[in-house]
Image: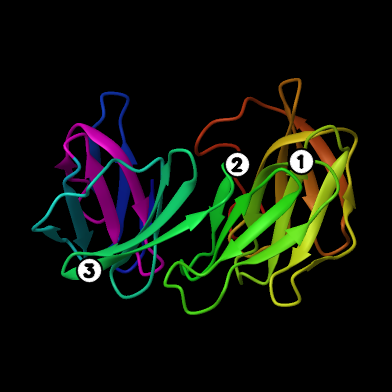
Amino acid sequence: MGLDPEAEFLYLRTDGGELVGYDLESGRLDTVATAVAQATLGPDGTLYVVDDQRRVISAARRVRFAWPQPLATLPSDLFGAVNQRLVLVVRQELVRVITAGATQAPTVREVPATGDVAATVWGDLVAVAADSGIVLLDPLGRRDPLFVRLLEHPRALAFSPSGHRIYVARRDWPGLAVVDRFEGKELDGIALPGEAATIRLDPLGRWLLARPAAGDSVWIVDLALKRLAGTLPTTWQVDLPAVAPDGTV
């Protein structure tokens, strides 16, 4: 799942649906929750877990807190946000983006799109793929949604760590679109040998990993130069391949 660097806790999700915390100082392994449906880390290292009964547990600085009320429905996507809030995505006929807190009334926003969803590190902006572009949405409703039109159908989305750029993989398109969140328009794209199915950025926003739509390999993209740096053979999993802060793949 990720690391809480201040508490020196590494969080892991097992094949059996358990969420465990590994203490990097003592080597102790503790179970945080069982029957886990969704889990995510917030920008401050807080862990949020939703079990199959829609109950939420948050863990921060080695202290766990059970939210007093369960969620109304199980989310399909989950993102941590600032101020101990969760951003949940519920997929029905439309995508509903819900901002919830342990003691706060939820904020619900509907999006006329059903594609891939990404959020900034801070959870202050959500991008949803539509048929002909992407919708940029403030989960708290402080400003109106913004639609950015793109050529071809967006397939996968990823924000830069700063949240300034959104990288978009598109169907039947050999490359990536780059969108400026503030100007709300497409910038120069990045050429790739083929169509990318999934994309992932490193913690500092220097390198992007793209999984081709076919084959067991990964494309490594240098974002500073906006070009393909190389290809490595690998399978693609929820946590690997990845790029460490020092640039090691």
Q: Amino acid at mark 2?
A: Gly
Please provide the residue range marked out in magenta.
25-53
Query: Is label 3 in contact with label 1 (beta carbons under 8 Å)?
Result: no
What residue is pinned by disc 2?
115
> Where does label 3 land, which residue?
105
Q: Viewed as shown, does residue 95 lie left or right of 84?
A: right
| Callout 2 touching callout 1 (CB < 8 Å) | yes
Query: Against 186, is 193 above or below?
Result: above
Q: Quadrant of the C terminus?
A: top right
Asked if residue 41 is positioned above or below residue 74 in the image, the reply reads: below
* Front residue of 60 and 25: 60
Depth order, front residue of 124/240: 124
Whether residue 113 appears in magenta in the rendering, the answer is: no
The tag earlier along the polypeptide, 3 or 1, is 3
Residue at mark 2 to residue at mark 3: CA–CA distance: 27 Å
- Residue occupying image coordinates x 83% and y 42%: 152
Can residue 246 be seen? no
Q: Please tell me how crowded label 1 is: few (under 14), some (14-19), or many (20+) other residues with Cα within 10 Å.
A: many
Residue 153 numbered mark, or none: 1
Q: Residue at x 61, y 69 (%)?
A: 163
Estimate the x, y position of residue 71 in percent, counting from the top left.
21, 49
Q: Is residue 57 left or right of residue 9?
A: left
The way the protein has been coloured in the rendering is rainbow
In the rendered image, residue 30 lying in the magenta stretch gets the answer: yes
Sequence-earlier tag: 2 or 3: 3
